[in-house]
Image: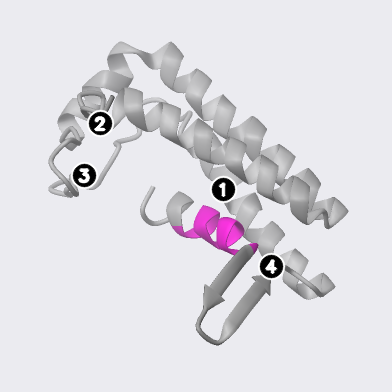
Amino acid sequence: MLSIIDPNIDYVWNSVATISTAKGTEERRPQTDEEWQLVKQHALTVLEASNLLLIEGRPVSAAGAATSSGGAELNPAEIQQAIQTNRADFIARAHALHDSTQKVIAAIDKKNVEELIETGSAVDQACEQCHTQFWYPNDKRPE
């Protein structure tokens, strides 16, 4: 996640932004064919990484790696156990990531910024639904 999916989906999400500062407002959008192609390359990497998630027996992290940044996350062994116990759910979550990323790529191919924002949000939802089940299922959310 940290090496492949996160940096690549962040690039896609950050390709469109409205940034307001004391100096004014900047609208960030891919403009040229080359910029759109670069965003697509990052999205394609996420698409292919969703296929990697389907490989049975693939460890969730390198030995000794930390998965917790704030205390709510499970450790790698617990995540691995949750995936093994709920393999069908995990596969469905990986497919949701794949399907939503395909929609992002379609938006990129059309060079449609509004659709890129909408489909990018669907990818975020796919990620979050998987994380809340397999990475931090015990996280207490404010009511």
Q: Secondary structure at mark 2?
A: loop
- Sequence-first disc among 2 and 4: 4
132 or 22, which is in the foreground? 22
Q: Secondary structure at mark 1?
A: helix
Residue 32, quarter of the rendered image: bottom right
Magenta residues, start to end: 7-16
The answer to whether residue 113 is left or right of residue 77 is right
The answer to whether residue 75 is left or right of residue 58 is left
| Residue 19, image x, y percentages | 56, 71
As shown in the figure, which amino acid type bears the numbered disc 2? Tyr
- Sequence-first disc among 3 and 2: 3
Between marks 2 and 4 in the image, the one whose residue lies nearer the viewer: 2
Report the residue that reaches farthest toward the front.
22
Mark 2 — residue? 136
Q: Does the magenta portion include 119? A: no
Q: Which mark is residue 105?
A: none
Mark 4 — residue? 38
- Sequence-first disc among 3 and 1: 1
Q: Which mark is residue 67?
A: 3
As shown in the figure, which amino acid type bears the numbered disc 4? Leu
Between marks 3 and 2 in the image, the one whose residue lies nearer the viewer: 2
Image quadrant occupied by the C terminus: top left
| Residue 133, image x, y percentages | 33, 23
